[in-house]
Amino acid sequence: MNLWYSEHLTLIWQTLIAIPLALSVQIALRSGLFSFASIGFYGIGGYAVGILTLHGWPPMVALLLVCTASVLIGYVISSAVVHLRGLYLGMVTFAFDLILTVVATNGGELTGGALGLIGIPIGVSTLGLVIATCLVLALAHRTERYAVGRSIAGMEASDQLAVSVGVDVRKQKRLIFALSAGLGALSGSLFALAFGTMQPTTAGFSLVILALTMAIIGGTAAWPGAVIGAAIITWLPTFTSYVGSYQNLVYGVVLVAVVMYAPDGILGLLSWIKSKVKNLSGQAFRPPSSDLKGRDVVSEQR
Amino acid sequence: MEQVVNGAVLCSIYVLFSLGLSLTWGILDKLNLAHGAVMMSAAFFAYLITEHWDAPLAVLFAVGICGAGLLTLVFDVIVLGQISRSASGKQHNELRTLIAGIGVNAILVTIAQRHTIDSPFGIGHLDSHIYVLGGAKISVLQIWIIVLAIALCIIIAVWTERSQFGRGLRAIAHDAEIAELMGIRTRMSSAVLMFVSGALAGLAGMLLVMYLGALTPESGDSLLLKGFAIIILGAVGSIWGTLLGSAILAAAETIVVVQTSGTWVEAIAFGIILIVILVRPQGIFARGTGERV
């Protein structure tokens, strides 16, 4: 166990760091926000924490400061973008991410140019990462229950529906956007503190694909989906070592296959299997997974 | 003067690339995020042929253009067809279409990356004929690029605005279900449009790889974003808007390259996207209301 642990320490850290990132995309998607802004905040968080700790700030203080600032910045930015419909929001936030990579490349001394930041003091341990992940998951769980959870489920089904039952859609979306920004920044900060480097390309095009793949493969219905997605995407390369450099090809194929045949991801498949098993044991009929979410919303509103 | 020629060529490539993207988005409501990779694939197919056979240029162009068209058609029929068949909300399907495009993009780019071992590839046939026209040097290829872009703009405009087929397309854009009830073969029309869209991207890819001498497997990604910037500048689905958007982007980029070191060029397209969507989401030259947002 100990040997296994030390051999796979990097992967364990990567998984723990990927979970907040996957959640940040997932929470946005679940609320009907097709936003990649959290990837940009991943870059901002990583660079900000890196720069602060390189200037002698204690890592914990830098981390907390950066995450809080990101939530606030996210909330301010959100007022300009949350009214945009699906695709437009996706493209604006995508452009936002890519502008940041250009800014980081041209940042001179401060950001280290194209080489990025090197030698950021390592400031996290496995225990710290586990605690951070647990806190994040608890927060995510909170957004799925109570009034908040129900209003988010309503917004995912339809904005008009949510408005008609008295949900302040705009306010909720702004809060979700800010939360997503904070989660992205947290993930980026943890990455910088765990691996000690930050490059302009770290938070670029490929990370957008990676984070989206995690959220979609796992399923966006509930937080375990993000955990499953983050774990699969991080560990997949080790299981398929012969795939090697074709890794992105596998991601692409999996992504296409999932949106074609299992739009609710692994989580959806699991609940579909569960309903099948229940069916076999003679219980009342339950519809397949794709209808589940809509049904839950409707029944909760009754 | 030389910069004007460069700008015009850049603008022409942008037009050819964005036209297909704009048409399928405006008429079929499908934003194909694999469009950039399709463009790259056309040049890649041609490159695969040149590896084994010293083929004439016409064959390379035919293979690249048809290959790109078929690629888009297959993506539409198999993947997007499956997505639209599953009973799910419109908003949900739109998201799935985008994600499928990202997935196909990753597949095509990775195949090209592996085959070329991450290095730029070219197809040869570099031309050397250079004319001097009013103080500016202009090559035969540059003339071809500009002429083809103008010609195709006119052809596509006439095709979509004057022909029977184009009327059908506009009916589909308005409401696909009613169009079908009126006897328009929506599936056939959409397949033809998808093929044309891919073929235009393929043509852009072939011209670009000859113009630059080589392409990297990732070159489609930045072009896709530029295409998006162009479309939202010039209103979705509008041919003349696409032309204008391309001209603005190409002019801005040429000016920045001349004035600065060039590392900021990439940021222009992204900046345009940010500003236009935030300030005037329906596009600067749009007539109607911004109901899309």
Image (cartoon, coloured by chain):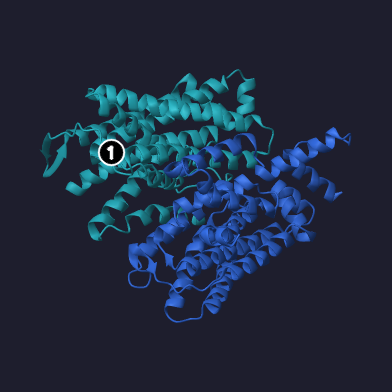
Residue A155 pos. (x, y %): 71, 51
In this structure image, what is the colour of chain B? cyan
Residue at image x 30%, y 41%? B215
Residue B20 pos. (x, y %): 43, 34
Query: Does residue B8 appear in the picture of this structure?
Result: yes
- Look at mark 1 in the image and give the residue it sits on: B121
Residue at image x 60%, y 71%? A128
Query: Does residue A32 appear in the picture of this structure?
Result: no
- Toward the viewer: B169 or B145? B145
Q: Quadrant of residue B82?
A: top right
- Toward the viewer: B139 or A140? A140
Give the tally of numbered discs. 1
Regarding mark 1 in the picture, which secondary structure is present there? loop
Spot the blue chain and give its letter.
Answer: A
Residue B216 versus residue B148 in the image, above or below? below
Chain for mark 1?
Answer: B
Residue at image x 34%, y 48%? B248
Residue A272 pos. (x, y %): 74, 39
Residue A136 pos. (x, y %): 65, 64
Residue B269 versus residue A110 in the image, above or below? above
- Toward the viewer: A280 or A45? A280
* Left or right for A97, reference B89: left
What is the three-letter code of the residue carrying label 1? Phe
Residue A74 versus residue B204 in the image, above or below? below
Q: Which residue lies furthest to the top in this view?
A: B183
Crowdedness of circle 1 by 10 Å Cα count: few (<14), some, many (20+)? Answer: many
